[in-house]
Image (spheres, helix red, strand yellow):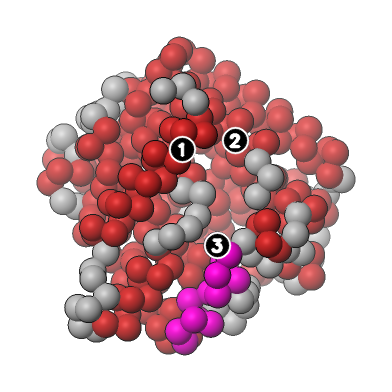
């Protein structure tokens, strides 16, 4: 199946089913917390990070079933970050994935606990014996996800974003922020999907890391463009929020045409990085193109 749309739908369905099986049922105490965890995780989202995990696994020959827990763990971390980002003390948003954010649908305390619980469940999920073929590699996978989630990854990038609100950043400062805030978790998705099948040769790992760095930045460039050009209904989240809040974005440094051109430069670099994988890297290439050409 070479059709990307069909493959991506299949991965989205697979991810939904894996998450539904791993998340606690809503009738298990504490019922509200578990219901809210399912509310934020299920029934929405592009599932780009799980797609990257499966695609990277395919590139190195990892068994598909082996990737399920790595993909789910990364998505849990991502959803936890969205849940916390939407809180009034952070970005204060009311809409996510086309429905009310967690603190609106439930309350702020529940939303805070949902993020905490999803973070813990992600590591529990990745620590299961079936998540990796080798114990030593599994420890490395846990370390990677922890680093990507913490102060030298996603949380650190968000901290930089908050401090930078209302002031101008140059390109190097902006990309430092996004390499941590967005790129770190994207890179971990790629590496976890590949590592689930075993240790990687140095050259293979370096190619995947380069690819992930490029698409992580391209993803954010296009997010900034779409935030300025696309309506709320299409995005599934509040459009124009970054500009209204004085956030540092690529569009504070370049116009839309320049931003799109830069995203395509990053795409070309990403495709060059995975060229040695040949046909096995098809899905990685398709995802990179989707990231740059998407409309939502």
Q: Which residue is mark 2?
A: 290
The residue positioned 29% from the left and 22% from the top of the image is 61
Pointer 3 residue: 97
Q: Please give the range of residues in magenta.
A: 95-107
Percent x, y of residue 236: 62, 61
* 237 with respect to 45 (left or right): right
Q: Earlier in the sequence, mark 2 or mark 3?
A: 3
State whether residue 29 is above or below residue 16: below
Up-down relation of residue 229 to residue 265 (above or below) = below
Q: Is residue 260 left or right of residue 68?
A: right
Q: Quadrant of residue 111?
A: bottom left
Left-right relation of 84 to 15: right
How many C-alpha atoms fall within 10 Å of the one at disc 3: few (<14), some, or many (≥20)?
some
Q: Is residue 44 visible?
A: yes
Badge 2 crowding class, 10 Å Cα cut-off, few under 14, some 14 to 19, many 20 or more, is: some
**x 19%, y 52%: residue:** 127
Q: Secondary structure at mark 3?
A: loop
Residue 62 in magenta stretch: no
Whole-percent x and y of residue 264? 71, 30
Q: Circle 2 — which element?
A: helix
Question: Which quadrant: the N terminus?
Answer: top left
């Amino acid at each position: 199946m070479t059709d990307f749309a069909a493959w991506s739908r299949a991965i989205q369905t697979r991810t939904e089913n894996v998450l539904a099986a791993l998340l606690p049922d809503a009738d298990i105490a504490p019922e509200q917390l578990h219901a809210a965890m399912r509310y934020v995780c299920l029934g929405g989202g592009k599932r780009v990070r799980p797609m990257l995990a499966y695609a990277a696994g395919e590139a190195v020959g990892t068994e598909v079933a082996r990737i399920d827990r790595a993909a789910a763990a990364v998505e849990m971390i991502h959803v936890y970050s969205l849940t916390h980002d939407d809180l009034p003390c952070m970005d204060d948003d009311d809409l996510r994935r086309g429905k009310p954010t967690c603190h609106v649908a439930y309350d702020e305390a529940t939303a805070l606990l949902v993020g905490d619980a999803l973070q813990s469940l992600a590591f529990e999920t990745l620590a299961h014996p079936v998540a990796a073929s080798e114990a030593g590699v599994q420890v490395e996978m846990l370390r990677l996800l922890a680093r990507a989630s913490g102060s030298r990854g996603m949380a650190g990038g968000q901290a930089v974003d908050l401090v930078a609100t209302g002031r101008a950043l140059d390109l190097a400062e902006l990309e430092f922020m996004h390499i941590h805030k967005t790129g770190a978790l994207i890179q971990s998705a790629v590496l976890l999907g590949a590592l689930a099948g075993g240790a990687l040769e140095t050259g293979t790992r370096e190619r995947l890391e380069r690819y992930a760095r490029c698409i992580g930045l391209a993803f954010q460039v296009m997010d900034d463009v779409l935030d300025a050009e696309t309506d709320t209904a299409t995005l599934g989240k509040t459009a124009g929020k970054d500009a209204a809040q004085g956030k540092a974005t690529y569009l504070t440094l370049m116009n839309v045409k320049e931003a799109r051109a830069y995203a395509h430069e990053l795409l070309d670099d990403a495709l060059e990085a995975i060229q040695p994988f040949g046909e096995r890297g098809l899905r990685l290439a398709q995802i990179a193109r989707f990231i740059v050409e998407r409309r939502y």
